[in-house]
Image: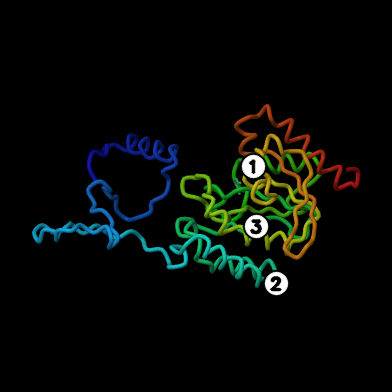
C-alpha cells in the first residue's frame, strides 16, 4: 500500500473517514486495484475472434473470497430453497438453527453474527425492523445500538420492555456499511421472517419503517402515509394478525420532530393491547 500517512493521528483520521463513509468492513486480506485487474472471462459467444496474444499473460489477481454455491445461485431459486427450509422449522430454536446453516444469502459471509431475535417470543407484540447495524452485528441481536435505545424508551412510554415484546428484522444479517438490503436479499430472507412471525404467533406486529411495512404488508406507499393505520398481516397457515406500521427509530433519531408521530403510533398500540382500539 502506498501514500498512507505515517503518524498515528493521521492514520486514525483516515480510518474514521472511511468508517463514516460506510467503508467499515474488510472483504479481503489485501486491497485490489480493480482497474488494473483483468476483466472477468467473457461468455463464449462474445469471445474475441482473433486468438489472444501468447506473450505477457495477465497478472493473476488474488481470488476474492469464494461464496458457497447457494449464495451465488439465482435469487428466485435461493428464495425457493429458503421457503422450503423455513417451512420445516417447528420451533423458533429450529428456525434459528436452520437460518444459521443457510448459505443462500451472501450477507451471511460479510456479517460477524446472525442477529436472529431479542426479547420474549411469548409476548403479545412482535416488532420487525429492517436489518442489523454494526452493534447488532457485533452482539448478534436486533436493536442493540442507538436505535434500539430509543426503541426501548418508546416502549417504556406505553409500559412495555423487552421482557414483554419480541424483536426481529426482515433481514437478519448486517448489510456491509449499513447499506439498504437489496430486493433480492429481502426476497431470500422473507420466508424466514414470515415463519418467525408464524411460530411466535404475536397478537400484534409493529413494522418499524417503510421496508418492514412494504415487505410484510405488501403496501406500496411510503411509511409517512401508512404509519398509524392498522393492517392485517396474514400468516401462511391462514392466521390474521393486526399490524401497525410506524416510523423507524433511526429515522426518528435523524428527525426528532417526527417523534410525536411515533408516539401517537405507540399510543395506538397501547389502546389495542388494552382492547380500546
Ligand atoms: N435498525 C434495524 O432496522 N434493525 C436493527 O436491528 C438495528 C437497526
Q: Is residue 169 left or right of residue 71?
A: right
Task: Please give the label number shown on residue 90.
Answer: 2
Q: In terms of image quadrants, where is residue 258?
A: top right
Q: Where's the C terminus, which quadrant?
A: top right
Residue 155 percent location from the top left of the image: 75, 43
Q: Nearer the viewer, mark 1 or mark 2?
A: 1
- At horizontal 65% and vertical 29% (from top left) the residue drawn is 256
Residue 7, horizontal then vertical, whole percent = 29, 36
Image quarter for residue 92? bottom right
Residue 224: which numbered mark, if any? none
Residue at 37 percent of width and 35 percent of height: 13
Q: Residues within 10 Å of mark 3 (few under 14, many from 20)?
A: many
Badge 3 or badge 1: first in the primary sequence: 3
Badge 1 element? helix
**24 to 52, vertically: above or below:** above
Element under label 2? loop
Q: Position of residue 72 (x, y in %)?
A: 43, 63
Task: Give the CA distance from mark 3 to mark 1.
Answer: 20 Å
Q: CA distance from mark 2 to mark 3?
A: 16 Å
Q: Which mark is residue 210?
A: 1
Extreme residue in the left direction = 55
Q: Residue 164, image x and y in percent?
A: 78, 53
Whether pointer 1 and pointer 2 mark residues with C-beta atoms closer than 8 Å, the reply is: no
Q: Residues within 10 Å of mark 1 (few under 14, many from 20)?
A: many
Q: Circle 3 is placed at which residue position? A: 117
Is ligand 1 within 8 Å of the beta carbon of the residue shown at mark 3? no
Question: For disc 1, does the CB lie below 8 Å from ligand 1?
Answer: no
Q: Residues within 10 Å of mark 2 (few under 14, many from 20)?
A: few
User: Observer-nearest residue: 189 or 16?
Assistant: 189
- Say if disc 2 is inside 8 Å of ligand 1: no
Left or right for 81, reference 153: left
Amino acid at each position: 500500500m502506498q501514500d498512507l500517512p505515517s503518524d498515528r493521528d493521521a492514520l486514525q483520521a483516515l480510518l474514521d473517514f472511511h468508517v463514516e463513509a460506510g467503508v467499515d468492513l474488510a472483504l479481503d486480506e489485501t486491497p485490489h486495484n480493480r482497474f488494473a485487474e483483468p476483466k472477468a472471462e467473457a461468455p463464449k459467444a462474445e469471445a474475441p475472434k482473433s486468438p489472444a496474444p501468447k506473450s505477457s499473460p495477465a497478472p493473476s489477481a488474488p481470488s476474492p473470497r469464494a461464496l458457497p454455491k447457494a449464495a451465488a445461485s439465482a435469487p428466485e431459486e435461493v428464495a425457493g430453497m429458503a421457503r422450503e427450509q423455513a417451512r420445516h422449522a417447528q420451533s423458533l430454536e429450529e428456525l434459528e438453527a436452520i437460518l444459521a446453516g443457510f448459505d443462500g444469502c451472501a450477507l451471511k459471509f460479510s456479517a460477524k453474527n446472525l442477529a436472529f431475535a431479542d426479547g420474549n417470543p411469548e409476548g403479545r407484540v412482535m416488532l420487525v425492523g429492517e436489518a442489523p447495524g454494526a452493534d447488532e452485528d457485533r452482539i448478534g441481536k436486533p436493536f442493540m445500538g442507538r436505535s434500539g435505545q430509543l426503541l426501548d424508551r418508546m416502549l417504556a412510554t406505553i409500559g412495555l420492555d423487552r421482557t414483554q415484546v419480541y424483536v426481529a428484522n426482515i433481514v437478519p444479517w448486517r448489510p456491509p456499511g449499513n447499506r439498504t438490503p437489496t430486493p433480492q436479499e429481502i426476497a431470500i430472507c422473507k420466508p424466514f421472517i414470515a415463519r418467525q412471525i408464524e411460530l411466535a404467533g404475536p397478537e400484534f406486529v409493529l413494522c418499524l419503517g417503510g421496508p418492514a411495512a412494504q415487505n410484510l404488508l405488501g403496501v406500496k406507499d411510503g411509511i409517512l402515509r401508512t404509519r398509524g393505520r392498522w393492517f392485517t398481516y396474514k400468516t401462511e397457515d391462514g392466521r390474521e394478525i393486526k399490524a401497525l406500521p410506524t416510523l423507524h427509530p433511526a429515522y426518528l433519531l435523524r428527525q426528532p420532530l417526527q417523534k410525536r408521530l411515533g408516539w401517537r403510533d405507540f399510543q395506538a398500540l397501547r389502546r389495542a393491547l388494552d382492547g380500546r382500539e
